């Protein structure tokens, strides 16, 4: 009664205490058509159910920076649906883009891990940490999405496979919140492949370039 559920997009009160979005916002989601659900970037299939526009940026920034974590449970089923439509559900594990320790400590959580955990539940497969970020970098969001090379150089050499992760022969699904140029995903996929992963697929809640 004191904290009624609110729509993660418009903030309107919800009658369904188990819901996350109002009917109006649900009807106006910028969903991608099947032909645009997936793109190939440097050999990595990247899947996303939504375009990064309209109400989506605000909701994902709330999830990422302002502890509005219920958004993870809302986006995960949409991500699963997109994977199913693309015929990509045969994974051995779900993993996520790691944060540097200082940024994780300041924020208290990793939005990509939250999304990965919720998605792994819906898929019924393990969620595992497979990568570490060995040094802090400028946030990719501060670098123009038009400058793909600057984004690529910003994440070059900053990720390493976790010494505790057994990736040999595994089909890995790596999760992030937004796909822009794909620089971060590709840097992580390269490390997973080098550690023995048989296949790396990426899924995000939204894609900026449609």
Image (cartoon, rainbow, N blue to C red):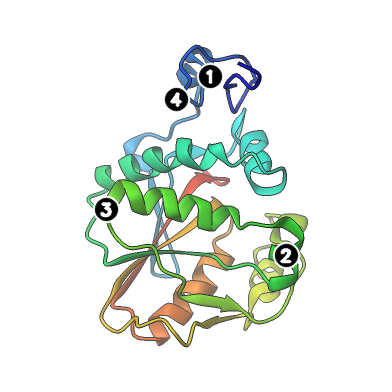
Classify 27 as above or below 178. above
- Within 10 Å of disc 3 (Cα), the crowding (few <14, some 14-19, many 20+) is few
**Total marks placed:** 4
Report the front residue among 57 and 41.
57
Q: Is residue 123 left or right of residue 113?
A: left
Label 4 – label 3 distance at C-alpha: 21 Å
Q: In the drawing, what numbered circle is on residue 124?
A: 3
Residue located at (37% from left, 39% from top): 77
With 92 as the anchor, is 103 left or right in this view? right
Q: Tell me how far mark 1 sits from mark 4, CA to CA.
A: 16 Å
Identify the secondary structure beneath mark 3. Answer: loop
* C-alpha gap between disc 1 and disc 3: 28 Å
Q: Is residue 181 left or right of residue 74?
A: right
Mark identifier at residue 25? 1
Q: Earlier in the sequence, mark 4 or mark 3?
A: 4
Task: Give the distance between the C-alpha atoms of the residues marked 4 and 2, in whole angstroms.
Answer: 30 Å
x%, y% of residue 157? 62, 83
Question: Which one is closest to the eye, mark 1 or mark 4?
Answer: 4
Which residue is labeled 2 in the image?
105
């Amino acid at each position: 009664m004191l904290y009624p559920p609110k729509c993660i997009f418009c903030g309107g009160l919800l009658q369904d205490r188990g819901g996350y979005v109002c009917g109006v916002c649900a009807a106006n989601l910028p969903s991608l058509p099947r032909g645009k659900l997936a793109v190939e970037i440097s050999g990595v299939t990247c899947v996303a159910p939504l375009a990064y526009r309209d109400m989506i940026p605000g909701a994902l920034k709330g999830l990422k920076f302002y502890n509005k974590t219920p958004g993870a449970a809302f986006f995960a089923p949409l991500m699963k649906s997109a994977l199913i439509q693309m015929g990509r559900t045969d994974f051995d594990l779900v993993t996520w883009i790691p944060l540097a320790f200082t940024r994780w400590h300041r924020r208290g959580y990793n939005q990509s891990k939250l999304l990965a955990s919720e998605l792994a539940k819906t898929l019924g497969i393990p969620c595992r940490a497979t990568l570490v970020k060995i040094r802090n970098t400028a946030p990719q969001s501060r670098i123009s999405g038009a400058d793909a090379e600057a984004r690529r150089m910003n994440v070059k050499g900053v990720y390493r496979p976790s010494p505790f992760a057994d990736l040999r022969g595994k089909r890995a699904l790596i999760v992030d919140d937004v796909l822009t140029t794909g620089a971060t995903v590709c840097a992580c996929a390269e490390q997973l492949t080098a550690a023995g992963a048989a296949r790396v697929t990426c899924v995000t809640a939204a894609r900026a370039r449609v």
